[in-house]
Image: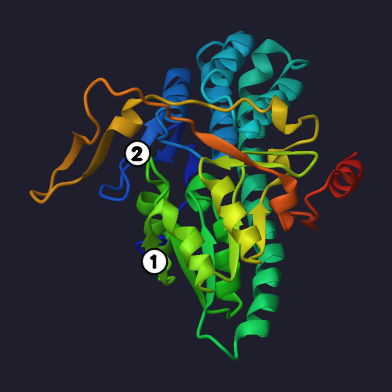
Amino acid sequence: MMIGGERLQSIWYDRNADTVCIIDQSRLPHEFEIIDLNNLGDACHAITSMQVRGAPLIGVTAAYGVYLALRDDPASLEQATQALLATRPTAVNLQWALQRMNQGLAATAVEQRVTQALEVAQLMEKEDIAICEAIGEHGAAILANLWEAKRESQSALNVLTHCNAGALATVDWGTALAVVYKAVAAGVPVHVWVDETRPRNQGAALTCWELGQQDIPHTLVVDNAGGHLMQQGKVDICVVGSDRTTLDGDVCNKIGTYLKALAADDNAVPFYAAVPISSIDFSATQEGIPIEERAADEVSHITGLADDGLVKRVRVAPHGVAISNIGFDITPARLVTGIITERGVFEASRASLQQLSTALD
């Protein structure tokens, strides 16, 4: 991603310092800070505290977490895996990454595991960049075709997204926002409607920040505005990410995604999920997806930049109120126009995704 005119990733390995560097997303958009992960505890904390977030980035961070753990204790593979598995339950990339690390390391001699773990983690980092760029290219073709049908009647193609599925959710490029970035690069004039995404406001804090860095026109809206915008004909397409997609094409994503899909279906607006294949759980049905419920204070409190220039946290709900902070919902396949992957665009159906699964074997 471009930040202040410089190309940066969300995570990378600094060979000179032998440390893993991340952008601390919990401080954005008011403060930009790069921090080091030096051990397993740092990696686990980065995931649970959402210093890193987004399914693909969580997976790569977990892979580096295994390396950091083995660097301290080459015999700690099982303990490191269990600690990292406990950090976030919903994003399937976490499990996928740890399975891949274990497959590559279980048969490796203990004294060689540190070197091997670093090599695999770095490979996963590079692969994620290429995968997300390919997702963007396949999705950009959809936006380009849609723009050809609408260019005579409007000045820009209006895309609505939910949460942050940009470069900050991956190593680079992103998933849903990669589609936007590649479409803009191809000459499609895009305007993005950005849902605020309560309670952590990833849309307001992260998506708006990313789009601003890229000089892409965008407008922040409250989460409940999407349906109204669609009724008014102001949304041409919805593109979201996914933390876990089932073989049937059901899309698990940030809470509120399902409501956007319902509104899109009612107003004949195409609704796509941009998904790396690693986020597709070919063994899962929607009933088997664990839905994370996060801490109540994410809802009862809000953090922002005060008029005095200081970042402050304030309470917005009464003391003692019962709070449910469900982190994700599931959009059924019947509401999904298509699944954009690095291998192309697939129908949100078992038959179509089964063909993809077979092609991977």
Residue visible at 42% across and 47% down in the picture: 197
Seen in the picture, residue 215 relative to 51 is either above or below; the reply is: below
Secondary structure at numbered mark 2: loop
Per the image, the residue denoted by label 2 is 26
Secondary structure at numbered mark 1: strand
Q: Position of residue 334 (x, y in %)?
A: 75, 50
Q: Amino acid at mark 2?
A: Ser
Residue visible at 70% across and 52% down in the picture: 335
Residue visible at 68% across and 25% down in the picture: 101
Q: Identify the coloring.
A: rainbow
Q: Position of residue 263 (x, y in %)?
A: 58, 57
Task: Locate the C terminus by quadrant.
Answer: top right
Q: Furthest-left residue in view?
A: 308
Q: Would residue 34 appear left or right of 39 to someone viewing this image? A: left
The picture quadrant where one finds residue 239 is bottom right
Seen in the picture, residue 269 relative to 18 is either above or below; the reply is: below
Q: Is residue 359 visible?
A: yes
Asked if disc 1 and disc 2 are in contact, CB closer than 8 Å, the reply is no
Disc nearer the start of the sequence (1/2): 2
Q: Furthest-bottom residue in view?
A: 152
Q: Position of residue 290 (x, y in %)?
A: 62, 25
In depth, the one of 223 and 77 nearer the eye is: 223
Which of label 1 and label 2 is nearer to you? 1
Residue 293: give its label: none
Q: Is residue 171 visible?
A: no
Q: Amino acid at mark 1?
A: Thr
In depth, the one of 157 and 82 nearer the eye is: 157
Work out how far the residue at label 1 is from the one at label 2, CA to CA, in angstroms. 22 Å
Residue visible at 48% across and 38% down in the picture: 53
Say how many tags the image has.
2
Per the image, the residue denoted by label 1 is 219
Seen in the picture, residue 80 relative to 56 is either above or below; the reply is: above
